[in-house]
Image: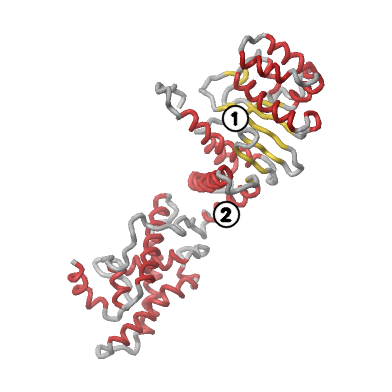
Amino acid sequence: MDKPHSDKYSAAEQGLGYIYQARLALLQLLQLPENTAVFLEKDDDLDFVDSHGGKSLASLKHKASGDRLTDLSTDFWKSVRIWLARYKADGRGTSNLRFFLLTTGTVSTNSFLKTFLLTQSGTEDDSTNLSEQADEILSKSKSALIGDITAEFNELTPTEKQDFLARILIIDGSPRIEDIPETIRDKHMRSIRREHRTSVFERLEGWWNDAVIKQLTGGRDEGIFGYEVSDKFSNLAEEYKLDNLPITFRGKAPREEIDAENDSRIFVMQLREIGISSHRIRNAILDYYRAFEQRSEWARENLLVSGEIEGYEDRLVDEWGRYRDVVFEELDDSSAEDVLLNAGKELFKWADQQSGNYESLRIRTRVTEPYVTRGSFHILANSSPEPRVYWHPQFLGRLGRLLGASE
């Protein structure tokens, strides 16, 4: 990550900066009072607004390992230029602004900038002559950029210079972009079992990035509040408790086009055999996809205990068998086809519309998402070499003929 890019047209460093900006904003908001709001790319890289209207502008610098800030570091003075403009526009000494430089680099021990460090703030006896120190440092530079900044700085009165500089804080040694997830997991996820923290962070950051994109694209005018992060984090944490499982495929659809008319899978054949409409078959295909992919994700993340899926399916099959016996009780070999169809439709209606209401048919007590149960029935209806559940009373006897016709 720290290796220089040989391609002078590479945008990797700039792209990394944007990702760092969003990721560090999340970390900072987790560490601030919940009623704090953050804006990205407004007056600075990050704007933090507290419940009293006080605003803190933060410039972010993701530097190469070992990078140091010295007296005339452009990272600092370019930020000063931004802050000067905001300070003047906001009423100078009457403004409620504070200024932060968050950098992965470190301030040199013999630099004037060390007086702005959090560990030094308010402890230096000579802190009252910050403006004199700044004037002296700026006078040493022959840079045109520094010259322009000096001119803008000198538009302030000595009192305003002192007031302005006293509002600046440098936080050096900030976490690097690749270290922020671990920092969040270690400091803010102790209530979550260690094996689940990476998954929770990834989902939290996914939600966070969506919120950031909405703000940057104008879909959201207000800041993102700390309590929103807390609420989302709390909701995610609940999903990883022992009586629950995360639901991540709600609203998802397979990449390939759904073809309810020509899908040759056994569970779809079963629905056609009892005359279910194409629209309902499409819903069934969605439920099957979501349940199958959800189970796969749970397995990948080791969220399931050994034999849990098998035990869950056995419960579904047992309950299906009990309801089937009731619905099919009056049927025999001489029953008319329309009677058989109605019985099959009634049995499927129970599985599709009613079975999810039974707590005993949930994989875990608090997993109430309908596609989990519905899709699981379709997975069982698709089992080979023979479906474990079926809808048409004579489907198993017709299976060979139907499979031959589909080939």
Residue at the image point whose x is 71% and y is 20% from the top = 152
Q: Position of residue 324 (x, y in %)?
A: 36, 80
Marks 1/2: CA–CA distance = 30 Å
Place residue 392 in its image quadrant: bottom left
Q: Quadrant of the C terminus?
A: bottom left
Bin the neighbour count of mark 1 within 10 Å (Cα to Cα): few under 14, some 14-19, many 20 and up.
many
User: What's under tag 1, amino acid-wise?
Assistant: Leu
Q: Which mark is residue 245?
A: none
Q: Quadrant of the N terminus?
A: top left
Left or right of 293 on screen, residue 62? right
Residue with the mark numbered 1: 60
Residue 108 visible: no
Q: How many marks?
A: 2
Left or right of 237 on screen, residue 378? left
Tell which circle, 1 or 2, labels the residue nearer the N-terminal end: 1
Q: From the viewer's perspective, is residue 135 above or below residue 117?
A: above
Residue 67 visible: yes
- What kind of element bears circle 1? strand
Place residue 326 in its image quadrant: bottom left
Q: Position of residue 321 (x, y in %)?
A: 36, 77
